[in-house]
Amino acid sequence: MGYLIAHRATMKHLLSQYAYGVELQGSILTNGTKQWHHDYNFPKITLGIVYSNLGNNKILGEVIGVLGGLNLPFFQEKGFRFGANFNGGIGFITKKYDVKRNPKNNAIGSNLNCMVSAGLLVEKIWKQHAIGFEINMTHLSNGAIVLPNLGVNLPTVKLSYSYYFKPIDMTGEANGEIEGPSIKKWNFYTQLILSAKQIYPTGGHLYGIFGLTNFAQYRFSKKSIVETGVDFIYNQSIVPYNDVTYSFHKNMRLGIYGAYVLPIHRFHILLGMGGYVYKPLPPNGWVYLKFGARFRIIDRLWGNVTIKSHWAKADYFEYGLTFRW
């Protein structure tokens, strides 16, 4: 059960009722045969189907989503387990904005959206059963590919029951081998980003975005990496947004950023902040944020999905490939 947050004053008309939903989830509890199982206190790998209304059936409808993720325990003791859930996937919203049929929906302009959630979960675990209580935040957005895109933020509380087909086994032993880059060592990367977005008014042109990032990482420990880099961005929407005469450099931006990276098996979760050092035209301020994940495809090649924003306002999703030199 939850309640829609009107994070903009223009969204207050969407508040109508409590949201409620149900989730069917499968999970694999790691058993200790890999070193990262021990490093992260025996996490769970999850995949689930979610159904929920969004607190306003008339304007927003319902969402049906597919989410995959991880449960990372902070501690386990005497059958109790407390940790964080991180999930990402795709959500289908049944009622999007339509200029004629649904003009009051200023939150979401597309049926298909990115769906992410994060929460804190406490469980009581027996040999093959568990009950849980979770406080969670779910976000839905299309990254401004289709406007409007103020997004949906839905805080919820959840009750859960889990049944394991086999008795829980966390007795496996690992060889201590560290996955990925070595500790106390610098690594250098080049990242290519492609994306697209619309600008207001709604129903307009889709503008392409190209990005090239060179960055360095230093791994302090098994669970801590710091990153710093330089972003070159070419965003075709900047000139039409400002309604000025076209010139190549007017669509360009150059930024410098720093980030913390959490390495988990084949995934890296990234949270970063940067500032523009070259920005000929508005919109937005001089500070930008990054949040997302990279996943290792082969030894030196990674996939990348991150969202770039200016504080609480999403700019666009970054889809790309990363190469380690």
Image: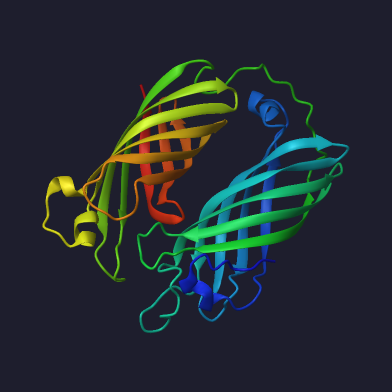
For the rendered model, the colour scheme is rainbow
- Location of residue 138 (image quadrant): bottom right
Up/down of 296 relative to 51, above or below: above
Q: Is residue 106 left or right of residue 196?
A: right
Q: Is residue 112 left or right of residue 156?
A: left
Q: Is residue 178 left or right of residue 37?
A: left
Q: Is residue 170 left or right of residue 219?
A: right
* Residue at image point 75% right, 25% down: 172
Could you tell me which quadrant the N terminus lies in? bottom right
Who is closer to the viewer here, 7 or 286?
A: 286
Who is closer to the viewer here, 252 or 39?
A: 252
Q: Position of residue 194 (x, y in %)?
A: 31, 45
* Residue at image point 70% right, 55% down: 135
Who is closer to the viewer here, 319 or 213?
A: 213
* Residue at image point 41% right, 67% down: 110
Q: Position of residue 108 (x, y in %)?
A: 44, 68
Could you tell me which quadrant the C terminus lies in? top left
Up/down of 275 relative to 225, above or below: below
Q: Position of residue 60 (x, y in %)?
A: 52, 74
